[in-house]
Image (cartoon, helix red, strand yellow):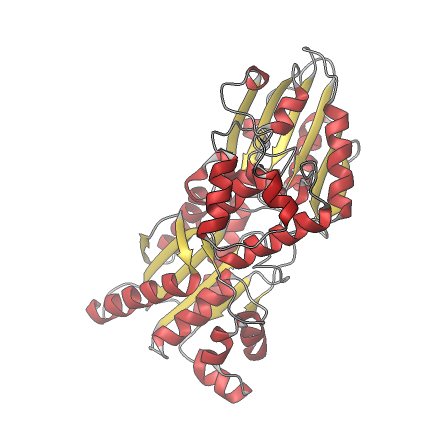
Amino acid sequence: MIQDPKAFLRALFDRAVEVADPMRSIGAFLPERPEGRVIVVGAGKASARMAEAVEAAWGPCEGLVITRYGYGRPCKGIEIVEAAHPVPDAAGLAATARMMALLAGLKSDDFVLALISGGASALLCAPVDGVTLAEKQAVNAALLASGAPIDRMNTVRKHLSRVKGGQLAAQAWPGRMLSLMISDVPGDDMAFIGSGPTVGDLSTVEDARAILAEWRIDVPASVRAALERPSGVVPPGDPRLARVENRIFAAPRQSLEAAAELGRSRGCEVRMLGDDLEGEARDVAAAQAALALAEKAKRGAGAPPLLLLSGGELTVTRRGDGIGGPNAEFCLALALALNGATGIHALACDTDGVDGAAEVAGAIVHPDTLVAAKRAGVDAKEALARNDAHRFFGAIGDQVVTGPTLTNVNDFRAILIA
């Protein structure tokens, strides 16, 4: 018997985040510190924590890492620069230029350690010629509002960049590079983690143009012109990538398995729905609510609690002017679909602590969610129509706020059926 479902769900999420903490997970993947010159570069919401963990093992290092505002960590040698996410800013632009300059002119016996996590797509900002920062910001905002899956968004980003799609690694040639990554993408495809700055890519500008057309994404004329020219994206067989090794050291599956282990230790039956789910948040919520209701109807009085776990990266197509993100929108749509069903509680949070652009990780749903909303004077259907899930859950006190978690293995969802 789970006495406090809300506390139990939060404990599951905290466990999922804990096992993905670079301070406890990166060490097994670090080699002995190489002889000669060692440079550490990186970007992402977990990159400063990764740099901190590297220096704990190797001592002070030369280097530069770019992370999100508020996600910096103390390092003795590696410089930590904070910049904007999910829409890039001037700080990220300037820091990326300095990083590329740091990698220029390396020798074959120089060693580069690259630290890449989710968020690097926005934090590594180097627009192609003819595209300004303001125009790049407009493209990022339009991509985020489109509802397009992350791999489609990152394909467009690569062909508008001088650093993504293997170009960071190519800049370091002929030096040797090891790139260590935390995966935040469905399927753990390294080419799409942070838009693959150290990974070769076979996509083309034609692919990028097709994505803009498919998702009806309006972009400035300069961007369309840039996508008529060949980009600098580096194909996998390029000799400049021959001395690059890419490895993932933390991924969504590990975090879900850790949460599942905790759930089983508390007497739950656990069912994994997948660590790579994609789709519109409200549609996935409707499907999982139907599953939860069906499972509840089948379970007898003596059955153990059933825990449904899933990960991946859901999307939100912006329809209104509210404040929300895919995890909170999932929870709001789930609450409406469950309609107060007894014995079903749920949590959905982003493991980086930021759901959408808000400093909120996600939310918790319980049988009284809609009743609490009515008491607070907020309308669930109206909030969903306006993409206003964060304000909805804030009004009833069911937001999950973690602050910077210093890692990022994507969305975490748990539905508990008592």
- Residue 323 vertical placement versus 193 (above, below): below
**Residue 299, quarter of the rendered image:** bottom left
On the picture, is 115 further left or further right than 216? right
Residue at 55% over, 27% down: 29
Residue at 75% over, 46% down: 82
**Camera-nearest residue between 119 and 254:** 119
Residue at 70% over, 28% down: 40
**On the rendered image, what quadrant is the C terminus found in?**
bottom left
On the picture, is 214 further left or further right than 117? left
**Camera-nearest residue between 401 and 39:** 39
**Camera-nearest residue between 148 and 267:** 148
On the picture, is 364 further left or further right than 97? left
Residue 173 position, x and y percent, is 65, 17
Query: Quick check: can you spot residue 86?
Result: no
Residue 416 position, x and y percent, is 37, 64
**Camera-nearest residue between 182 and 89:** 89
**On the rendered image, what quadrant is the N terminus found in?**
bottom left
Residue 27 position, x and y percent, is 59, 30
